[in-house]
Amino acid sequence: MRVVLAVLRYLPALGGSTRVVQLLAEGVAARGHEVTVVTQEEPGCPAEEQIGGVSVVRLRMRHVGGFRVPRNYLGRLRGLDADVFHLHGNRIWCADYYFPFARSFDWPQVITPHGFYHYWMRRGTIRWLYYDHYFPGRLRAFDRYIALTEGEARQVVGWKFPPERLRTIPNGIDLGEFALPSGDPVATRSSWGLTARHLAVYVGGLYDNKRVDRLVRAIARLRGDWGLVVVGVDVPGSAYDRAHCEALARDLGVPVRFLGPTSREDVLDALGAADAYVQGSAFEGFGIGLLEAMAAGLPFVAYDAGAARELAATGAGFVVGSDSEMAARLTEVVDHRETFTRAARDAIPAYSAERMVDRHLDLYRSVLRTAPRSER
């Protein structure tokens, strides 16, 4: 099978959707299929190369009025001979420059929008026109829609997408990363320089949807018994960037350490050294950090965004609606850590990268068995 994936950014870029597409692309290639990823250029990277058995095609971009415009995007796609085309994203260049021409391609088409950040986090006329009028019609050109969560699936059905062409496939992670012991937890905690008895960790950027301020407020309610460690890139100028959250922590007397972006090894060490994982997001397409916490045997407490509610149903953590509730649940998970760890480890095999690849290959085969678009 020949599969083409289009995505905003690919390696060496970092990010949740980038990581998921990498695991999918390399997993499909490892099963003996031919995989090509079409993405945007990255500084210092060649226009074409092989990474992990995957052919990567990077397009030059023009920047016009704050928008990225890909050079010869449709031409490059038309030059690829594929059995399945799989588009990732919405309100980004790889989706928006394809949508108007989707019906002109004969290949079976699959879309994974990765949730609707702009729909939930932005207001205004453009948002209304795009999601309430334009986007639902564009979706109907696709043979299959992959939702990451049941909540996303309900949203899409509400936009009148045919339910028989909808599949829910949750994201997966590389469980092999968690098979070996992480670093020395005592040394890791010592390096953070926090003296609180218990420590919560959050991994992700300080984007406006991540709401790290909620985590600071929750930890403040525990009156010094807990500290907070934040791993991830700062986003200066966002409503809840590092400067805002540091000032809030000082005002509330919260012991917090902002580590910034770190190596993958340091992320795994942090998960292995903390007492709980916390997430304050107002929006998540899925929330890979919750899966990684589960794989590390770390209980989580999260606001209701992305897959948090579905993952909490496994018994691995809690969904909350306020900072006071988060504080109360943190006390509960640390008192019953073994129960949550056991539930997480029982549930996590269903979210392996291998299982995710299996589900995608089954879906790809299902569209191959349908009639060509010209015969429908």
Image (cartoon, grey):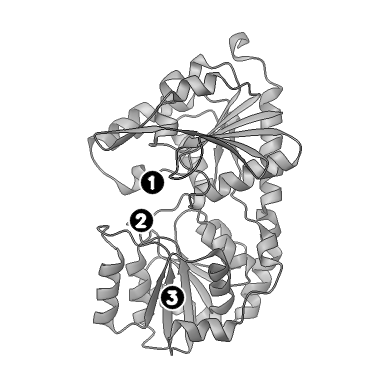
Q: Secondary structure at mark 1?
A: helix
225 relative to 243, above or below? below
252 relative to 33, above or below? below
Disc 1 to disc 2, C-alpha distance: 8 Å
Label 1 or label 2, whichever comes before in sequence order: 1
Q: Residue at x 59, y 50 (%)?
A: 171
Residue most extreme to the right: 32
Q: Residue at x 41, y 43 (%)?
A: 116
Quick one: quadrant of the N terminus? top right
Q: What x and y, as percent, mark residue 325? A: 41, 73
Disc 1 to disc 3, C-alpha distance: 25 Å
Q: What x and y, as percent, mark residue 363? A: 67, 34
Q: Residue at x 47, y 77 (%)?
A: 200
319 relative to 373, above or below? below
The residue beneath circle 1 is 117
The residue beneath circle 2 is 209
Q: Secondary structure at mark 3?
A: strand
Q: Amino acid at mark 1?
A: Tyr
